[in-house]
Image (spheres, grey):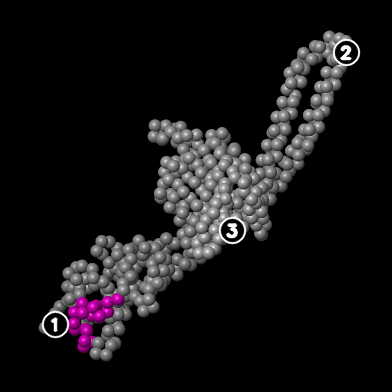
Amino acid sequence: MPQDFSSQISPPFLSQGSDRDLGLESTLQELSMYNFQVELSCTAIEVARIFEKYPLLPGAILREQGKFIGMISRRRLLEFWIRPYGKELFFREPLGMLYSYARTSILQLPDTTPVLTAMQLTLRRSPELVAEPIVVQTAPDTYKVLDIYELNLASWQIRGIETQVRYERSQTQMIQNDKMASLGRLVDGVAHEILDPVSFIWGNLTYISNYSQDLLKLIAAYDQESSGASHYINNLKEEIEFDFLEEDLSKALASIRTGAERLKKLVTSLQNFCHIDDVYPKPGDLHACLDSIVLLINSRIQGEIEIVKNYTHLPPVYCFMGQLSQVLMNIFSESIDSLLNEIVRHQFHPETTNSIDKPRIEITTKIISQEATKPGAPDSRWISICIADNGPGMSQQLHQQIIESFSMEKRADKTTSLAVSYRIITAKHGGKLNLRSQLGQGTEFEILLPLL
């Protein structure tokens, strides 16, 4: 009398996925998977009948006394079926013996694995295993079988979504670049219009200063030549406070000169920041670029943050000055935001925050050498620009998120200013952008540019 193995075979159960509502970060748990459990003690013929009854079933989870052992696929079972004398040799024997012959490498993944990552792992398998289903662990000691074709279909769908997202982002980026270019030309034109009257003021200040001094000398000469000043002139001098006017006139002219000079520098810095780079890099003065950015951010600092400059002599560096100015502005903005937030937090919650020194951003420039990676090659020389603050620093999680945003393989919802800065430094300039930060010890950005 044939033995009944029905109690050792659980009926196949298909767990439905999310009805193809997939996104770029979808995981395996959103896909349809089969839950088909088989004990090793049952015969292969019983499993073959289940496969015949359910033609879409890709494989079976194998257990021994309830413990997970492995997986055998429909394809492997069919290979034994079509062998010469395969039915007579294997199909009346326990499934454990068949599995010992068919044992192959099984790709086992947690259900939190992203679909695209799982697809990459399947393609790395040897050619004879590419079509094998995947074992997915959905809970402790709970396993399901994922059909490779289900994974392929989901992967192609996500790739399509990714292509569409990239297209939309490229279109948005093109529009944004065009708007920024137009804005840059507009600001450059406005700055030029401001610079013209400032130049008139600046150019005429010297003459006004000389003329005023000559007039004061003439008045003094009149006083000396006249035997006695008239009562009317004396009253007029007292009315206009001539002594104070004579003393304060030079101070007023010096103040106008300082204001005109500051406005001229500010407008020039604005023109440099809005400069549209040419196709090829040009030699530029990095210290002048840094000073221009510091001048532009003074309105945000408002005397609350100290800027310390540690400059060493640097040769002109071939670069895209407009893009490099944007990188520096992005980095300064990150440091300023961190310091200002800490100042506000300390003002409102002085008992919960540590008292720190005066908020400070330190800029250090120098030339460094790095050992060559290949034997016999000369050491490489780099321009180093370090921008460090004494703020609260970053948590390990935030630090990791920023580092991951630098990678082109990561699919962020939006491109951050630091990610754009990283690509400008690495892709456009062949340099490096390093980030070092620790809670309570501040943050340091280091830009390395190759010195040709």
Instruction: Kindly report the distance in space between the C-alpha atoms of the residues bearing marks 1 and 2.
Output: 143 Å
Residue at image mark 1: 2
Amino acid, disc 1: Pro
Q: What secondary structure is the magenta-colored segment mainly?
A: helix
Residue 235 position within the rendered picture, expressed as x and y whole percent measured from the top left: 80, 11
The secondary structure type at the circle numbered 3 is helix
Residue at image mark 2: 226
Against 399, residue 99 (above or below) is: below
94 part of magenta stretch: yes
Instruction: Kindly report the distance in space between the C-alpha atoms of the residues bearing marks 1 and 3.
Output: 75 Å
The disc label shown at residue 428, or none: 3
Q: Nearer the viewer, residue 136 or 320?
A: 320
The secondary structure type at the circle numbered 2 is loop
144 part of magenta stretch: no
Question: Residue at (57%, 41%) from the top-left corner?
Answer: 309
Instruction: Kindly report the distance in space between the C-alpha atoms of the residues bearing marks 3 and 2.
Output: 75 Å
Against 260, residue 144 (above or below) is: below
Q: Is residue 101 left or right of residue 298?
A: left
Residue 272 position within the rendered picture, expressed as x and y whole percent measured from the top left: 66, 47
Residue range in magenta is: 87-104
Local crowd at mark 2 within 10 Å, few (<14), some, or many (≥20)? few
Mark before the other along the chain sequence, 1 or 3: 1
Do we see residue 424 in this rendering? no
